[in-house]
Amino acid sequence: MVDKRTLASFPGSFKKLFGYLMDETKDLKVLFHDFEDEAGGFELVAARFCYNKKSLDCISFWTWSELLVALKECQDLLSASDSSLILEKILDCVVTRLASLVVASPCTCSSENTRISWWFEDLLVLKIDLIDKVIRMSISRNIDHATISKFLLCYQRSRFLTATPTEKCKIMEVMINLLSLLDRSSFSCKLLFGIFRVVSSLKISSHHKSILENLIGSQLDRATIDFLLVPSSRRKAYVYDVNLVLRLVKAFYIEGRCFLLDSRLRKVASLVDSYLVEVAADSHLSPSKFAALVLVLPDDARESHDRLFQAIDIYLEVHGGLCEAKKMKICSALNYAKLSTDALKHLARNPKFPSRIAIQVFINQQSKLENLFEDKTHLVDTFSSSVFAEESIDEKVSSDQVLVYAKRINLPNKAEHLDVQLQGMQCTITELEKYCGIMQTQIGNIPRTRLSSLGNNARFLPKLCS
């Protein structure tokens, strides 16, 4: 049996075979025995036999409608793996029309969006393999990437109405491949998460899932918390897909390692902190997974660790039975220097945190307090010698007493004395705040004439408790 594609692959041979008979006046008749007579078989042979390179040159003069009809015919006659001179020539003409700034759309357009997307509906009838060829050629001709991404979304929505599960997988895999060739600014993070939700119910390859996650990771700083709250698979006990977020953050670092701006990193850190607060209340989330989340970002990614502390506090509240080692692993992500005063107070007296954490917080608070006393004492001495020689004697004595009390504070040898020391520090802070309030009141009562009498020395007056 003669296969039609085998026969069609030798148009030059037939031409040579019948060439010397072309001058005969009698009609020629060719009989093919056992020819595979399926739909379109003869048309394919005739097309390849009749169209040589010279006759294909006239395709560039065809109308848009004629090109579409020819493209559809080629699609029906050729398999995806066939390489046809006719098909390549038609595709070249189609993409040339799309890329041309001279040739206007064949329809009357009332808006800019319609003018850009006039060809979308015409190409929706093509199969995904042919769409792959059209888009790749369009990218090589520098057709606007944003327009291409919009067409791909339009095509996916249209074809999914009647596609089988296998066809849907093929469409999504080709679509993901094509999106990876486009500029990252040509499509939104919302579009990518929409594609992710679609493929979550399909059995696409792990390779294409990885490509999609890398695309999402590259735009993670443009995502919102709602995008990240993806339910975990039924095989997992925890509520949200934590592994997905870990992969996305790592992809963000890989994609942006060469030009990662601090502003982008801060946005991702804020997003991760919001996600941590959401998932911390999940009683099924293991300590190892939560620890991986809190440690996925470096310390310099966050300007403040208050939200991180809030998430850890919630997690330790829900998971009250954790051992000290697991708590320490989770708390190792905290930078106490980046915690606010209120967060430090809460942490120091929080029984859910390990005792060693409280000691570290105590050291940090003591260091901050000693620095504060040194600054305030210097300001009081300067101000007292300049303006309030008589009026500030009592306050100076009080300040000295507070300073002496503060310098007696040392790290307790035993953890059980920690709470007593913290209470003493709190009293010291309260006294200092009261003292600063008195000083501010006295500064406000100074007549402007007394300040003006200081002359140029007035600029050295300190700004207390600002």
Image: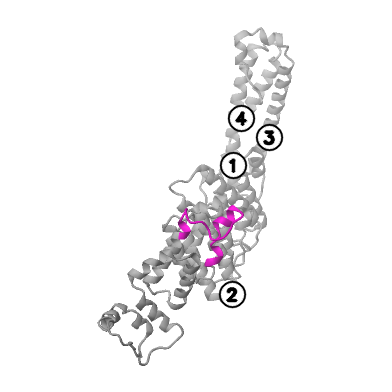
Question: What range is drawn magenta here?
Answer: 97-123
Report the amino acid beneath label 3.
Gln
Q: Label 3 to label 2, Cα distance in Å?
A: 70 Å
Q: Nearer the viewer, residue 313 or 171?
A: 171
Q: Nearer the viewer, residue 177 or 151?
A: 151
Report the amino acid beneath label 1.
Ser
Q: Residues within 10 Å of mark 2 (few under 14, many from 20)?
A: few
Report the amino acid beneath label 2.
Thr
Question: Would residue 360 be seen by someone viewing this image from the given angle?
Answer: yes
Per the rendering, the mark at residue 162 is 2
Select label 3 or label 4 by which is in front.
3
Q: Label 2 to label 1, Cα distance in Å?
A: 51 Å
Residue shown at 52% from the left, 50% from the top: 297
Select label 4 or label 1 by which is in front.
1
Residue under pointer 3 = 426
Q: Label 4 to label 2, Cα distance in Å?
A: 80 Å
Q: Nearer the viewer, residue 227 or 356?
A: 227
Residue shown at 42% from the left, 83% from the top: 41
279 relative position to 205: left or right: right
> Of marks 3 and 2, which one's residue comes earlier in the chain?
2
Which image quarter: residue 346? top right
Quadrant occupied by the C terminus: top right
Residue under pointer 4 = 408
Question: Would residue 325 be seen by someone viewing this image from the given angle?
Answer: no
> Of marks 4 and 2, which one's residue comes earlier in the chain?
2
> Of marks 4 and 1, which one's residue comes earlier in the chain?
1
- Does dot 3 land on a helix, a strand or a loop? helix
**Visual colour scheme:** one colour
- Does dot 1 land on a helix, a strand or a loop? loop
Select label 4 or label 2 by which is in front.
2
245 relative position to 449: left or right: left
